[in-house]
Image: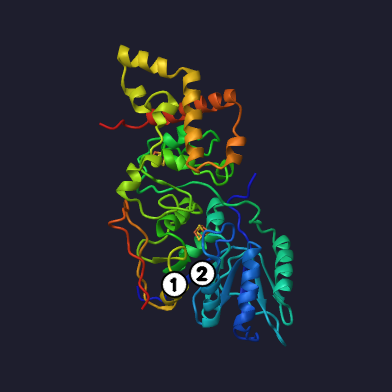
Amino acid sequence: MAVKDQYSLRVVLYDGDGAQPIPASDRFDATTALLEKGFSVTQAKPGQTVSPIGSAPLLLLGRFANTDAPEIAGTVPGSRVVSRNILGVDAAGISALSEAASLELQAARFGEWKPWFPVIDYDRCTNCMQCLSFCLFGVYGVDDAQKIQVQNNDNCKTNCPACSRVCPEAAIMFPKYKAGPINGDVVSNSDLNREKMKIDISALLGGDVYSMLRERSEKAQSRFSKERDADKALKERQKCLVKLAQSGDIPPEVLMSLPSPDEIARRAEEAKAKAAAALAHQTPPA
Amino acid sequence: MAEVPRILYCHCAYAQVVPAEVKTAVLRKLCDAGVAFDAVPDLCEMSARQDPNLQNLVSGGCVKIAACYPRAVKWLFAAAKAPLPPDGAEVLNMRVQTAEEIVTALLNTGLQPNVPQGKVTAEDAPQPVAAT
Ligand code: SF4
Ligand code: SF4
Protein backbone atom coordinates (compact mmCIF):
# COMPACT_ATOMS: atom_id res chain seq x y z
CA MET A 1 0.00 0.00 0.00
CA ALA A 2 0.96 3.53 -0.59
CA VAL A 3 3.06 5.72 1.56
CA LYS A 4 0.94 7.93 3.81
CA ASP A 5 1.71 10.42 6.57
CA GLN A 6 5.44 10.13 5.94
CA TYR A 7 7.89 12.85 5.09
CA SER A 8 9.53 12.92 1.69
CA LEU A 9 13.07 14.30 1.45
CA ARG A 10 13.60 18.05 1.47
CA VAL A 11 16.81 19.26 -0.16
CA VAL A 12 18.18 22.67 0.81
CA LEU A 13 20.43 24.42 -1.71
CA TYR A 14 22.49 26.71 0.46
CA ASP A 15 24.73 29.50 -0.73
CA GLY A 16 24.96 31.72 2.31
CA ASP A 17 27.85 32.30 4.71
CA GLY A 18 30.61 29.72 4.51
CA ALA A 19 29.62 28.53 1.06
CA GLN A 20 30.46 29.69 -2.43
CA PRO A 21 27.59 31.20 -4.39
CA ILE A 22 25.84 28.84 -6.80
CA PRO A 23 25.18 30.50 -10.17
CA ALA A 24 21.51 30.88 -11.08
CA SER A 25 21.74 28.49 -14.04
CA ASP A 26 23.26 25.77 -11.85
CA ARG A 27 20.57 26.30 -9.20
CA PHE A 28 17.93 25.99 -11.92
CA ASP A 29 19.44 22.78 -13.32
CA ALA A 30 19.84 21.20 -9.89
CA THR A 31 16.35 22.21 -8.75
CA THR A 32 14.74 20.89 -11.92
CA ALA A 33 16.60 17.57 -11.66
CA LEU A 34 15.61 17.16 -8.00
CA LEU A 35 11.95 18.04 -8.58
CA GLU A 36 11.76 15.55 -11.42
CA LYS A 37 13.05 12.89 -9.02
CA GLY A 38 10.28 13.71 -6.54
CA PHE A 39 12.30 15.71 -3.98
CA SER A 40 11.23 19.05 -2.52
CA VAL A 41 13.83 21.80 -2.86
CA THR A 42 14.41 24.90 -0.79
CA GLN A 43 16.64 27.61 -2.14
CA ALA A 44 17.82 29.29 1.05
CA LYS A 45 19.20 32.83 1.17
CA PRO A 46 20.54 34.63 4.22
CA GLY A 47 17.92 36.89 5.79
CA GLN A 48 15.04 35.55 3.67
CA THR A 49 12.24 33.35 4.88
CA VAL A 50 11.40 29.86 3.68
CA SER A 51 9.06 27.35 5.26
CA PRO A 52 10.03 25.91 8.65
CA ILE A 53 11.94 22.64 8.71
CA GLY A 54 10.15 20.80 11.48
CA SER A 55 11.20 17.18 11.56
CA ALA A 56 11.45 16.62 7.81
CA PRO A 57 14.42 14.54 6.65
CA LEU A 58 16.73 17.13 5.24
CA LEU A 59 19.72 17.17 2.93
CA LEU A 60 21.80 20.35 2.98
CA LEU A 61 23.81 20.97 -0.19
CA GLY A 62 26.38 23.70 -0.63
CA ARG A 63 29.71 24.49 -2.23
CA PHE A 64 31.80 24.38 0.89
CA ALA A 65 35.36 25.19 -0.16
CA ASN A 66 37.26 25.33 3.10
CA THR A 67 34.63 24.80 5.73
CA ASP A 68 32.16 22.25 6.95
CA ALA A 69 28.47 22.71 6.33
CA PRO A 70 26.88 25.13 8.83
CA GLU A 71 24.48 24.08 11.56
CA ILE A 72 20.89 24.29 10.40
CA ALA A 73 18.66 26.47 12.51
CA GLY A 74 15.09 25.38 13.13
CA THR A 75 15.49 21.62 13.22
CA VAL A 76 13.74 19.79 16.02
CA PRO A 77 15.39 17.18 18.25
CA GLY A 78 15.71 13.87 16.47
CA SER A 79 15.66 15.45 13.01
CA ARG A 80 17.26 13.44 10.26
CA VAL A 81 19.73 15.86 8.68
CA VAL A 82 22.77 15.28 6.51
CA SER A 83 24.90 17.66 4.47
CA ARG A 84 27.00 17.19 1.35
CA ASN A 85 29.56 19.28 -0.42
CA ILE A 86 28.57 19.85 -4.06
CA LEU A 87 31.67 21.74 -5.14
CA GLY A 88 32.30 20.50 -8.69
CA VAL A 89 29.17 18.29 -8.75
CA ASP A 90 26.73 18.74 -11.66
CA ALA A 91 22.92 18.39 -11.63
CA ALA A 92 23.02 14.66 -12.39
CA GLY A 93 25.51 14.12 -9.57
CA ILE A 94 23.37 16.17 -7.19
CA SER A 95 20.37 14.11 -8.12
CA ALA A 96 22.29 10.85 -7.49
CA LEU A 97 23.60 11.91 -4.09
CA SER A 98 20.10 13.05 -3.12
CA GLU A 99 18.74 9.61 -3.97
CA ALA A 100 21.37 8.07 -1.73
CA ALA A 101 20.57 10.52 1.09
CA SER A 102 16.86 9.78 0.75
CA LEU A 103 17.59 6.10 1.35
CA GLU A 104 19.96 6.86 4.20
CA LEU A 105 17.39 9.11 5.89
CA GLN A 106 14.56 6.65 5.18
CA ALA A 107 12.44 9.32 3.57
CA ALA A 108 9.24 8.36 1.74
CA ARG A 109 9.68 8.09 -2.02
CA PHE A 110 7.10 9.69 -4.27
CA GLY A 111 6.69 9.77 -8.00
CA GLU A 112 5.75 6.21 -8.81
CA TRP A 113 2.05 6.92 -9.19
CA LYS A 114 0.25 9.56 -11.20
CA PRO A 115 -1.59 11.41 -8.45
CA TRP A 116 -5.11 11.08 -9.83
CA PHE A 117 -7.77 11.16 -7.15
CA PRO A 118 -10.88 13.16 -6.23
CA VAL A 119 -10.59 16.27 -4.10
CA ILE A 120 -13.79 17.44 -2.43
CA ASP A 121 -14.72 21.13 -2.25
CA TYR A 122 -16.50 21.15 1.11
CA ASP A 123 -17.75 24.68 0.46
CA ARG A 124 -20.01 23.09 -2.15
CA CYS A 125 -20.55 19.55 -0.85
CA THR A 126 -23.96 18.82 0.70
CA ASN A 127 -22.99 15.37 1.97
CA CYS A 128 -25.57 13.71 -0.26
CA MET A 129 -23.49 10.50 -0.63
CA GLN A 130 -24.11 10.14 -4.35
CA CYS A 131 -20.37 9.84 -4.99
CA LEU A 132 -20.05 7.13 -2.36
CA SER A 133 -22.98 5.27 -3.87
CA PHE A 134 -21.61 5.57 -7.37
CA CYS A 135 -17.97 4.61 -7.00
CA LEU A 136 -17.40 0.90 -7.47
CA PHE A 137 -13.84 1.02 -6.24
CA GLY A 138 -14.31 2.07 -2.63
CA VAL A 139 -12.59 5.42 -2.99
CA TYR A 140 -15.12 7.20 -0.78
CA GLY A 141 -16.09 6.62 2.81
CA VAL A 142 -17.35 8.61 5.77
CA ASP A 143 -15.64 9.87 8.89
CA ASP A 144 -16.92 9.38 12.44
CA ALA A 145 -19.34 12.26 11.96
CA GLN A 146 -20.71 10.57 8.81
CA LYS A 147 -19.15 13.23 6.61
CA ILE A 148 -18.10 12.16 3.13
CA GLN A 149 -14.36 11.65 2.72
CA VAL A 150 -11.91 10.44 0.13
CA GLN A 151 -10.42 7.44 1.89
CA ASN A 152 -8.66 5.33 -0.70
CA ASN A 153 -6.92 7.56 -3.23
CA ASP A 154 -5.00 4.67 -4.68
CA ASN A 155 -8.16 2.84 -5.72
CA CYS A 156 -9.14 5.67 -8.06
CA LYS A 157 -8.88 4.78 -11.76
CA THR A 158 -6.34 7.05 -13.41
CA ASN A 159 -7.93 9.62 -15.73
CA CYS A 160 -11.48 8.63 -14.82
CA PRO A 161 -13.47 11.61 -13.49
CA ALA A 162 -16.85 9.84 -13.58
CA CYS A 163 -17.80 10.50 -9.96
CA SER A 164 -17.39 14.24 -10.50
CA ARG A 165 -20.17 13.92 -13.06
CA VAL A 166 -22.59 12.42 -10.58
CA CYS A 167 -22.01 15.11 -7.98
CA PRO A 168 -25.04 17.41 -8.14
CA GLU A 169 -23.00 20.28 -6.69
CA ALA A 170 -19.92 19.98 -8.90
CA ALA A 171 -18.01 19.63 -5.64
CA ILE A 172 -15.62 16.93 -6.83
CA MET A 173 -12.40 18.09 -8.44
CA PHE A 174 -9.58 16.27 -10.17
CA PRO A 175 -6.88 18.95 -10.28
CA LYS A 176 -5.10 17.23 -13.15
CA TYR A 177 -8.23 17.03 -15.33
CA LYS A 178 -8.14 18.97 -18.59
CA ALA A 179 -11.20 21.18 -18.19
CA GLY A 180 -13.22 23.16 -15.68
CA PRO A 181 -14.91 23.02 -13.32
CA ILE A 182 -13.54 19.53 -12.62
CA ASN A 183 -9.97 20.89 -12.64
CA GLY A 184 -10.83 23.38 -9.90
CA ASP A 185 -11.91 26.27 -12.08
CA VAL A 186 -14.93 28.17 -10.76
CA VAL A 187 -18.34 26.57 -11.16
CA SER A 188 -20.94 28.38 -13.23
CA ASN A 189 -24.66 27.78 -13.19
CA SER A 190 -24.44 26.44 -16.69
CA ASP A 191 -21.94 23.84 -15.45
CA LEU A 192 -24.51 22.63 -12.96
CA ASN A 193 -27.19 22.40 -15.61
CA ARG A 194 -25.11 21.04 -18.41
CA GLU A 195 -26.35 17.71 -19.64
CA LYS A 196 -23.00 15.99 -19.23
CA MET A 197 -22.80 16.99 -15.59
CA LYS A 198 -26.08 15.30 -14.92
CA ILE A 199 -25.77 11.58 -14.62
CA ASP A 200 -28.96 10.27 -13.15
CA ILE A 201 -27.67 8.53 -10.10
CA SER A 202 -31.15 7.50 -9.02
CA ALA A 203 -31.37 5.38 -12.14
CA LEU A 204 -28.10 3.75 -11.22
CA LEU A 205 -29.10 3.06 -7.69
CA GLY A 206 -32.66 2.06 -8.30
CA GLY A 207 -34.26 4.93 -6.44
CA ASP A 208 -33.38 8.14 -4.69
CA VAL A 209 -31.67 7.34 -1.43
CA TYR A 210 -33.43 10.06 0.50
CA SER A 211 -36.84 8.91 -0.63
CA MET A 212 -35.84 5.38 0.22
CA LEU A 213 -35.30 6.47 3.76
CA ARG A 214 -38.23 8.83 4.11
CA GLU A 215 -41.09 7.35 2.20
CA ARG A 216 -42.71 4.49 3.97
CA SER A 217 -45.91 4.27 1.99
CA GLU A 218 -47.06 1.14 0.18
CA LYS A 219 -46.53 2.86 -3.12
CA ALA A 220 -43.02 3.83 -2.29
CA GLN A 221 -42.30 0.36 -1.05
CA SER A 222 -43.46 -1.23 -4.24
CA ARG A 223 -41.66 1.24 -6.48
CA PHE A 224 -38.53 0.75 -4.43
CA SER A 225 -38.64 -3.01 -4.68
CA LYS A 226 -39.28 -2.86 -8.39
CA GLU A 227 -36.43 -0.44 -8.97
CA ARG A 228 -34.08 -2.36 -6.79
CA ASP A 229 -34.28 -5.21 -9.20
CA ALA A 230 -30.65 -6.17 -9.63
CA ASP A 231 -30.79 -6.70 -13.40
CA LYS A 232 -32.39 -3.35 -13.98
CA ALA A 233 -29.89 -1.52 -11.79
CA LEU A 234 -27.06 -3.24 -13.59
CA LYS A 235 -28.43 -2.30 -17.01
CA GLU A 236 -28.83 1.30 -15.95
CA ARG A 237 -25.31 1.41 -14.61
CA GLN A 238 -23.94 -0.05 -17.83
CA LYS A 239 -25.94 2.49 -19.83
CA CYS A 240 -24.50 5.26 -17.73
CA LEU A 241 -20.95 4.01 -18.10
CA VAL A 242 -21.36 3.78 -21.87
CA LYS A 243 -22.74 7.32 -21.89
CA LEU A 244 -19.76 8.57 -19.90
CA ALA A 245 -17.38 6.69 -22.15
CA GLN A 246 -19.00 8.17 -25.25
CA SER A 247 -18.60 11.66 -23.87
CA GLY A 248 -14.90 10.90 -23.56
CA ASP A 249 -14.94 10.93 -19.78
CA ILE A 250 -14.03 7.34 -19.04
CA PRO A 251 -10.87 6.08 -20.69
CA PRO A 252 -11.29 2.73 -22.47
CA GLU A 253 -8.73 1.12 -20.18
CA VAL A 254 -10.95 1.93 -17.20
CA LEU A 255 -13.93 0.31 -18.90
CA MET A 256 -11.75 -2.70 -19.66
CA SER A 257 -10.79 -3.01 -16.03
CA LEU A 258 -14.34 -2.99 -14.72
CA PRO A 259 -15.19 -6.05 -12.70
CA SER A 260 -17.65 -8.70 -13.88
CA PRO A 261 -21.37 -7.83 -13.94
CA ASP A 262 -21.95 -9.88 -10.79
CA GLU A 263 -19.10 -8.17 -9.03
CA ILE A 264 -20.37 -4.77 -10.15
CA ALA A 265 -23.80 -5.60 -8.76
CA ARG A 266 -22.27 -6.74 -5.48
CA ARG A 267 -20.08 -3.68 -5.10
CA ALA A 268 -22.93 -1.36 -6.06
CA GLU A 269 -25.06 -2.92 -3.31
CA GLU A 270 -22.23 -2.54 -0.85
CA ALA A 271 -21.64 1.12 -1.75
CA LYS A 272 -25.34 1.84 -1.61
CA ALA A 273 -25.62 0.26 1.82
CA LYS A 274 -22.71 2.37 3.09
CA ALA A 275 -24.31 5.53 1.70
CA ALA A 276 -27.71 4.66 3.14
CA ALA A 277 -26.19 3.98 6.55
CA ALA A 278 -24.39 7.34 6.48
CA LEU A 279 -27.53 9.15 5.37
CA ALA A 280 -29.56 7.49 8.10
CA HIS A 281 -27.38 9.32 10.61
CA GLN A 282 -28.12 12.68 9.06
CA THR A 283 -31.18 14.86 9.36
CA PRO A 284 -32.90 14.50 6.00
CA PRO A 285 -33.49 17.73 4.14
CA ALA A 286 -36.90 19.34 4.64
CA MET B 1 0.18 41.40 7.09
CA ALA B 2 3.51 43.17 7.39
CA GLU B 3 5.77 40.17 6.88
CA VAL B 4 7.23 39.42 3.46
CA PRO B 5 5.36 36.43 2.01
CA ARG B 6 7.24 33.23 1.37
CA ILE B 7 7.22 31.76 -2.13
CA LEU B 8 6.16 28.20 -2.97
CA TYR B 9 6.47 26.79 -6.47
CA CYS B 10 4.70 23.58 -7.58
CA HIS B 11 6.39 21.70 -10.43
CA CYS B 12 3.26 19.64 -11.27
CA ALA B 13 5.62 16.84 -12.18
CA TYR B 14 3.29 13.94 -12.83
CA ALA B 15 0.96 15.34 -15.49
CA GLN B 16 1.12 17.79 -18.34
CA VAL B 17 -1.65 20.08 -17.12
CA VAL B 18 0.60 23.04 -16.40
CA PRO B 19 2.23 24.14 -19.66
CA ALA B 20 5.89 23.10 -19.53
CA GLU B 21 7.05 26.43 -20.91
CA VAL B 22 5.20 28.34 -18.17
CA LYS B 23 6.48 26.29 -15.25
CA THR B 24 10.01 26.24 -16.64
CA ALA B 25 10.00 30.00 -17.15
CA VAL B 26 8.63 30.63 -13.64
CA LEU B 27 11.28 28.42 -12.05
CA ARG B 28 14.06 29.95 -14.13
CA LYS B 29 13.04 33.51 -13.28
CA LEU B 30 12.86 32.68 -9.57
CA CYS B 31 16.40 31.28 -9.75
CA ASP B 32 17.58 34.30 -11.72
CA ALA B 33 16.02 36.68 -9.18
CA GLY B 34 18.15 35.10 -6.44
CA VAL B 35 15.28 34.97 -3.96
CA ALA B 36 14.68 32.28 -1.36
CA PHE B 37 11.82 29.93 -2.14
CA ASP B 38 10.43 26.46 -1.60
CA ALA B 39 9.72 24.18 -4.55
CA VAL B 40 7.74 20.95 -4.45
CA PRO B 41 7.52 18.27 -7.13
CA ASP B 42 3.76 17.87 -7.09
CA LEU B 43 1.32 19.27 -4.54
CA CYS B 44 -1.29 16.76 -5.67
CA GLU B 45 0.87 13.80 -4.71
CA MET B 46 1.93 15.42 -1.43
CA SER B 47 -1.76 15.92 -0.61
CA ALA B 48 -2.70 12.37 -1.55
CA ARG B 49 0.12 11.06 0.64
CA GLN B 50 -0.64 13.56 3.40
CA ASP B 51 3.05 14.43 3.45
CA PRO B 52 3.71 16.26 6.75
CA ASN B 53 5.95 18.66 4.78
CA LEU B 54 2.67 20.35 3.79
CA GLN B 55 2.18 21.37 7.42
CA ASN B 56 5.57 23.10 7.31
CA LEU B 57 4.68 24.79 4.05
CA VAL B 58 1.59 26.42 5.56
CA SER B 59 2.92 27.11 9.02
CA GLY B 60 5.60 29.67 8.30
CA GLY B 61 3.44 32.77 7.84
CA CYS B 62 1.89 34.11 4.67
CA VAL B 63 2.73 32.47 1.39
CA LYS B 64 2.38 32.96 -2.36
CA ILE B 65 1.92 29.74 -4.31
CA ALA B 66 2.54 29.20 -8.02
CA ALA B 67 0.42 26.16 -8.90
CA CYS B 68 -3.01 25.93 -10.53
CA TYR B 69 -6.61 26.87 -9.68
CA PRO B 70 -6.97 28.44 -6.22
CA ARG B 71 -10.04 26.30 -5.44
CA ALA B 72 -8.09 23.11 -6.20
CA VAL B 73 -5.05 24.23 -4.23
CA LYS B 74 -7.18 25.22 -1.22
CA TRP B 75 -8.80 21.79 -0.98
CA LEU B 76 -5.59 19.87 -1.72
CA PHE B 77 -4.03 21.45 1.36
CA ALA B 78 -7.20 20.93 3.38
CA ALA B 79 -7.35 17.25 2.38
CA ALA B 80 -3.88 16.82 3.87
CA LYS B 81 -5.00 18.46 7.12
CA ALA B 82 -2.84 21.49 6.40
CA PRO B 83 -5.39 24.20 5.59
CA LEU B 84 -4.09 27.37 3.98
CA PRO B 85 -4.51 30.51 6.08
CA PRO B 86 -7.53 32.29 4.51
CA ASP B 87 -5.97 35.75 4.79
CA GLY B 88 -2.40 34.64 4.32
CA ALA B 89 -2.25 32.85 0.98
CA GLU B 90 -2.26 33.97 -2.63
CA VAL B 91 -2.42 31.36 -5.39
CA LEU B 92 -1.07 32.10 -8.86
CA ASN B 93 -2.41 29.89 -11.60
CA MET B 94 0.20 28.53 -14.01
CA ARG B 95 -2.55 26.88 -16.09
CA VAL B 96 -3.98 30.20 -17.20
CA GLN B 97 -1.60 33.03 -16.30
CA THR B 98 1.60 33.90 -18.11
CA ALA B 99 4.99 33.28 -16.54
CA GLU B 100 5.56 37.03 -16.57
CA GLU B 101 2.37 37.75 -14.62
CA ILE B 102 3.12 35.03 -12.12
CA VAL B 103 6.71 36.03 -11.44
CA THR B 104 5.74 39.68 -11.11
CA ALA B 105 3.15 38.73 -8.52
CA LEU B 106 5.53 36.36 -6.70
CA LEU B 107 8.32 38.90 -6.42
CA ASN B 108 6.05 41.73 -5.37
CA THR B 109 6.24 41.82 -1.57
CA GLY B 110 2.54 42.62 -1.11
CA LEU B 111 0.03 39.84 -0.66
CA GLN B 112 -3.39 39.67 -2.30
CA PRO B 113 -5.14 36.77 -0.57
CA ASN B 114 -7.36 34.95 -3.07
CA VAL B 115 -8.08 31.53 -1.60
CA PRO B 116 -11.82 31.12 -2.20
CA GLN B 117 -14.02 31.48 0.84
CA GLY B 118 -17.44 29.86 0.63
CA LYS B 119 -19.25 28.56 -2.40
CA VAL B 120 -17.54 30.00 -5.42
CA THR B 121 -19.28 30.71 -8.70
CA ALA B 122 -17.97 32.37 -11.81
CA GLU B 123 -19.53 35.63 -10.65
CA ASP B 124 -17.92 35.84 -7.22
CA ALA B 125 -14.60 34.15 -7.88
CA PRO B 126 -11.46 36.09 -7.05
CA GLN B 127 -10.02 37.48 -10.24
CA PRO B 128 -6.45 36.60 -11.21
CA VAL B 129 -3.98 39.15 -9.96
CA ALA B 130 -3.05 41.53 -12.73
CA ALA B 131 0.63 42.05 -13.45
CA THR B 132 1.90 45.38 -12.21
S1 SF4 C 1 -21.81 13.72 -4.57
FE1 SF4 C 1 -20.88 15.74 -4.28
S2 SF4 C 1 -22.25 16.83 -2.85
FE2 SF4 C 1 -22.73 14.64 -2.72
S3 SF4 C 1 -21.42 13.87 -1.02
FE3 SF4 C 1 -20.27 13.52 -2.92
S4 SF4 C 1 -18.99 15.38 -3.09
FE4 SF4 C 1 -20.61 15.87 -1.63
S1 SF4 D 1 -1.58 21.51 -7.35
FE1 SF4 D 1 -2.05 21.97 -9.48
S2 SF4 D 1 -0.04 22.56 -10.29
FE2 SF4 D 1 0.35 21.41 -8.42
S3 SF4 D 1 0.56 19.25 -8.95
FE3 SF4 D 1 -1.58 19.55 -8.49
S4 SF4 D 1 -2.55 20.01 -10.51
FE4 SF4 D 1 -0.34 20.34 -10.73
Closest to the observer, A139 or A228: A228
Residue in the picture at 33% in, 24% down:
A211
Which residue position holds label 1?
B102
The mark nearer the N terminus, 1 or 2, is: 2
Secondary-structure class at tag 1? helix
Q: Is residue A181 above or below residue A221?
A: below
Residue in the picture at 58% in, 40% down:
A252
Q: Position of residue B124 (x, y in %)?
A: 28, 57
Secondary-structure class at tag 2? helix
Q: Position of residue A190 (x, y in %)?
A: 32, 47
Which residue position holds label 2?
B22
The subunit carrying tag 1 is B
Residue A106 in view here: yes
Q: Which disc is residue A32 wearing?
A: none
Q: Position of residue A59 (x, y in %)?
A: 66, 69
Closest to the observer, A89 or A55: A89
Q: How is the image coloured?
A: rainbow
Amino acid type at mark 2: Val
Q: Quadrant of residue B92?
A: bottom left
**What quarter of the picture does the N terminus of chain A occupy?**
top right
**Pointer 1 with pointer 2, Cβ within 8 A:** yes
